[in-house]
Image: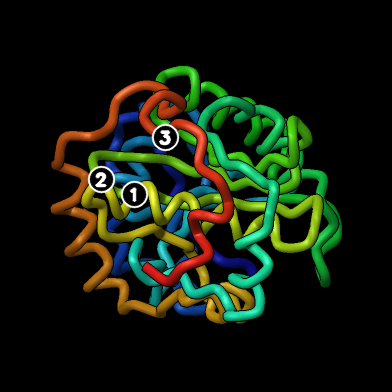
Amino acid sequence: MSIALPWLEADPLAPFPPVESALRDPNGLLAAGGDLSVPRLLSAYGRGIFPWFSEGEPILWWSPDPRMVFRTDGVRLSSKFRRQLRHSPWTLRADTAFEAVIAACASTPRPGQRGTWITREMQAAYLALHRQGHAHSVEVLDGEALVGGIYGVAVGQMFFGESMFSAQSGGSKVAIAGLAHFLHRQGWPLIDAQVENPHLQTLGALSMPRGDFLHIVRHQVQQATLAGPWDDRFGTLPASALANPA
């Protein structure tokens, strides 16, 4: 059965349909079409909407209910993993290898997933956001080797996580913990993790009703953001600093 979706107008600033009109099945599918320009993406994220589609599909826009989120003081690492971190040589930086992080997220195999939704078109769009200071990455490094990372979009004081990867076991856990540690120190309350995922739940992610999530988003996106690259603000963080519970 085909689904009749609202088709976005060519103007990147044209309004999205109300998120309350999103489908229940598939959960959160809201609209199709449009483009991945910087203005369109910022408009979407500021309304709790994100693009997610596969190669050969039109651009699809989503706002699921419930929404998966991390509190920035709520990332949970196991006691065993924290013990390992105390002796870890890894370090974390931000916005020093954004292109490498998004490429690794696109190419890392994932159980039950064929191919990637992070197409070349998507990579180009987020690189454009990054160059304008709206998209950011946290890199986990063993020396200068990239062993994990995460990237996403910042609007106001709200961070919308997009994807993370591990090249070595635990790399993505350290990346999300490091991002949360940094944002919590800045007073940012939440990281959007988009759709429910059992693995993220083991790390402390919570399911939040969409209405509650959007209430927070509307407030947070109006706050003064951390403009430009985050490399200097983030500095170099030893992974061992994440070994103790917040």
| First along the sequence among labels 1 and 3 | 1
141 lies above or below 126: below
Distance between mark 1 and mark 3 Cα atoms: 10 Å
| Label placed on residue 186 | 2
- CB atoms of marks 2 and 1 within 8 Å: yes
Q: Which mark is residue 183?
A: 1
- At label 3, which amino acid type do we have? Phe
Q: What is the number of the mark on residue 113?
A: none
Residue at 50 percent across and 59 percent down: it is: 242
Q: Residues within 10 Å of mark 1 (few under 14, many from 20)?
A: many
- Judging depth in this view, the residue of 242 and 133 nearest the camera is 242
Residue 72: percent from the left, percent from the top? 35, 61
Circles 1 and 3 in contact, beta carbons < 8 Å:
no
Q: Position of residue 22 (x, y in %)?
A: 39, 67
Q: Determine if residue 16 is in view.
A: yes
Query: Which numbered dot is residue 234?
Result: 3
Observer-nearest of 36 and 235? 235
Please tell me which residue lies in front, 135 or 92: 92
Around disc 3, counting alpha carbons within 10 Å, would you say few (fewer than 14), some (14 to 19), or many (20 or more)?
some
Where does residue 148 sit, x and y in percent of width and height? 69, 48
Q: In the displayed structure, would residue 167 be above or below residue 100?
A: below
Left or right for 126, reference 156: right
Rendered location of residue 187, percent (x, y): 21, 51
Disc 3 or 2, which lies upstream in sequence? 2
- Given the image, on which type of amino acid does mark 2 rest? Gln
At x 80%, y 55%, the residue is: 168
**Mark 1 or mark 3, whichever is nearer to me:** 3
Inspect the image, locate mark 1, and give the three-letter code of the amino acid beneath it.
Answer: Leu
Drawn side of residue 202 relative to residue 28, left or right: right
Circle 1 — which element?
A: helix
